[in-house]
Image (tube, rainbow, N blue to C red):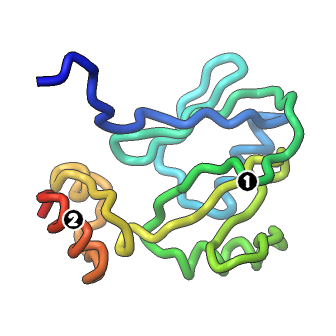
Amino acid sequence: MSTRPRLVGINHVALEVGDLDDALAFYGAIFELRGVDREPGMAFIDIGDQFIALSEGRAQPRDEARHFGLVVDDKLATRAALEERGVQILPGSRLDFLDPWGNRIQVVDYRDIQFTKAPPVIHGMGLEHVRKREAAIDQLHSKGFA
């Protein structure tokens, strides 16, 4: 048995933004936000059993390669929402975009990846209709997770 701790998940990702109200309006125009908590200088957007933290005040330049992957229930609808709002989608085979503060987000579809949520979380989020695609199920099987 290893004495080193195992990585078991990500609790949250913190993004620096210019203004919290503007950031919530931007993200709320693209994604359905089901829960937002606030404290001075911070906003927390619920994503089921996880969250994104928005921190007021961006100091670094825009992201180039550095990014985080945001999982959605419908990648095509996300693309349409981005296009409808005039958000530039970055070149390449993936669905990457920069928010107004330079945070690079890569959008991935829940059905296509090995990432999974527990049945009570799926139920609580109303996502029972979202089914993994075969390649994602194969990934889960190969690691003993399905």
In the displayed structure image, the side of residue 90 where residue 121 appears, left or right: left
Marker count (numbered) = 2
Check disc 2 and report its element: helix, strand or loop: helix
Looking at the picture, how far across and down is residue 129, in whole percent? 26, 75
Does label 1 or label 2 sit earlier along the sequence? Answer: 1
**What separation in Å lies between label 1 and label 2 (alpha carbons)?**
27 Å
At a point 55% along the width and 33% down the height, the residue shown is: 44
In the displayed structure image, the side of residue 72 where residue 92 appears, left or right: right
Q: Residue at label 2?
A: 140
Residue 130 in sight: no
**Quadrant where the C terminus is found in the figure:** bottom left
Q: Quadrant of residue 93?
A: bottom right
Looking at the picture, how far across and down is residue 108, in whole percent? 50, 67
At a point 70% along the width and 28% down the height, the residue shown is: 55
At a point 78% along the width and 70% down the height, the residue shown is: 90
Q: Residues within 10 Å of mark 1 (few under 14, many from 20)?
A: few
Looking at the picture, how far across and down is residue 36, in whole percent? 54, 38
Check disc 1 and report its element: helix, strand or loop: loop
Mark 1 belongs to which amino acid? Ala
Q: Residue at label 1?
A: 65
Q: Nearer the viewer, residue 103 or 82?
A: 103
